[in-house]
Image: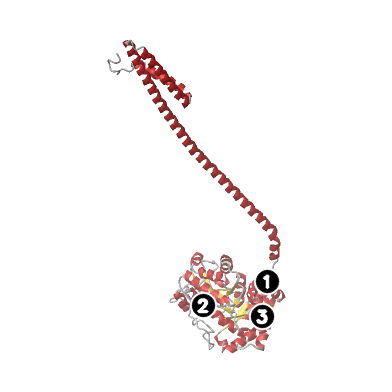
Amino acid sequence: MGKLFGRKRRYSDDEYENEEIYDDEELDDEEIDDDEESDDEEIDDDEESDDEEIDDDEESDDDEDDEDYDDEEWEEDERRVYRRRRRVRNQIIAYAVVFIFLILLLAGGAYIGKSIAGIVKAKKAEQEEERLKAEQEAEAARDVVIDPPETMEEEEPEEPEEDYLGEIVNAYISEMPLEDKVAGLFIVKPEVITGVSTVTRAGDGTREALNEYAVGGFVYSEKNILDKEQLTEMLSNTVSMSKYPIFLGVEEEGGDASKVASSRIEVIQVDDMATIGEAGDASQAYETGMTLGNYLKELGFNLDFAPVADVADAASSKLGERVFGSDAQAVGDMVSNVVEGIEGVGVSSCLKHFPGIGEAEGDTHAGRVETTRTLEEMRNSEFIPFKSGIEAGADFVMVSHITASAVDEEAVPSSLSKVLISDVLRNELGFQGVIITDALDTGAITEYYTSEQAAVMAIEAGADMLFMPEDFSAAYDALLAAVQEGTISEDRINESLERIYRIKCAEKLE
């Protein structure tokens, strides 16, 4: 029957499924065996098949048996081929799985190795950092152990300059009689104590006058200056005749407001302050200060009543060309540079006219002048140049006679006002140098106060020096009596003298 239908029939569905189950079971068993056992089975099957073929040939007499044999042989061959293919396929799959597993294993190993290497590297870095830190701490510890002896040697001090200066100052003040202490608070014209109409030389009369009234300083004008040799000799002799260090001052602002430059002495002429301020060149202001200071020092002066720190428009202010301008900040820059130039060569500068008279109407030389400016307005304008000059190292500040009724309700001239002198200038602006009044022989003072009253009021307000009182003898006697009676303490006088002598003795310290 198989031959009749061309052997196209293989298995029924049921038979095929049974065969697959059978083959799967065989495959599971065969997979346990290695490749050599598989090959042996194939050989056995072949030998068995050959034997069966020989037996079948011998029994081929029966046609029906032949047909059955052919069907069985075909089916057996087909099963072997099918099993072989499944075996090969499963082996390939197994090899692929193993290969993929090996790849994953290698990749995982590489990743783990890299991670371990990173951890080891970080650990080494941490250990190295700890080692360096330990070395630094050890080095620091060695420094602490080694350095203190050196530091102790360096700290053994030379005493600060302030201590040396203080000793010199105290040496002067402690030996002064009260009369000399009081006289030391005045700066006057030389004619006032000598009784001479015009002083052009310092002789025995000057010596006698200074022995009687040991004033703190002299101020000179054009009439005292004849020529360079005369001026230099007069100033030098005055210094040698004074029992104590003495201020020798002059008003040398630049331009026309210069007593020396306006004389017959040939000195370098400098521009007025308005011209310098208009140029806006701070270096020019500094050079101006240096020029003024240099020729004054060469002649024998040690105090210049300059620069003007008032804020005003030169075209409208009574001060005219003496002011730098109306921009407070710009004026501050000019003022500080002039101060640095003057002070830098060893001459004291004096800022004027606190709290500011630039825009005020009227002239204190003729009478009372009042400003309506408030304290806040002054802080935002007038005080700015004074603060700049103070920071630059000005030794003096001159207080004007302008009345600031919006600041001091007592409405007294600023030169006699405790509010303006002590509260504002000394405490708020922090000025620790010498505060000197403007000239006390002007109308703003003489029309309302006696010389005695003005002198005592100014010292009580906090001023350190009294500038040119109308009647020196009366002012001196009144101040001396106030101290003797206890109205003003001697300690208060000593405070002012200490500020004065710190400036006077600074050159001796050098």
| Residue 379 visible in the picture | yes
Instruction: Report the residue that reaches farthest toward the left.
Output: 4
Instruction: Give the amino acid at mark 1.
Output: Gly
**Is disc 2 surrounded by few (<14), some (14 to 19) or many (20+) residues within 10 Å?**
some
Which of the 4 image quadrants contains residue 200?
bottom right
For marks 2 and 1, give the CA distance.
Answer: 32 Å
For marks 3 and 2, give the CA distance.
Answer: 35 Å
- Give the number of the disc on residue 287: 2
Seen in the picture, residue 49 relative to 342 is either above or below; the reply is above
* Residue in the picture at 72% in, 76% down: 175
| Residue 197 visible in the picture | no
Q: Which residue in the protein does label 1 denote?
A: 166
468 and 390: which is toward the camera = 390
Label whose residue precedes the other's in the sequence (3 or 2): 3
Instruction: Point out the image quarter for the C terminus.
Output: bottom right
**Is disc 3 surrounded by few (<14), some (14 to 19) or many (20+) residues within 10 Å?**
many
Q: Which residue in the protein does label 3 denote?
A: 214
| Tag in front: 3 or 2 | 2
**Is disc 1 surrounded by few (<14), some (14 to 19) or many (20+) residues within 10 Å?**
some
Helix, strand or loop status at disc 3? loop
274 and 407: which is toward the camera = 274
Helix, strand or loop status at disc 2? helix
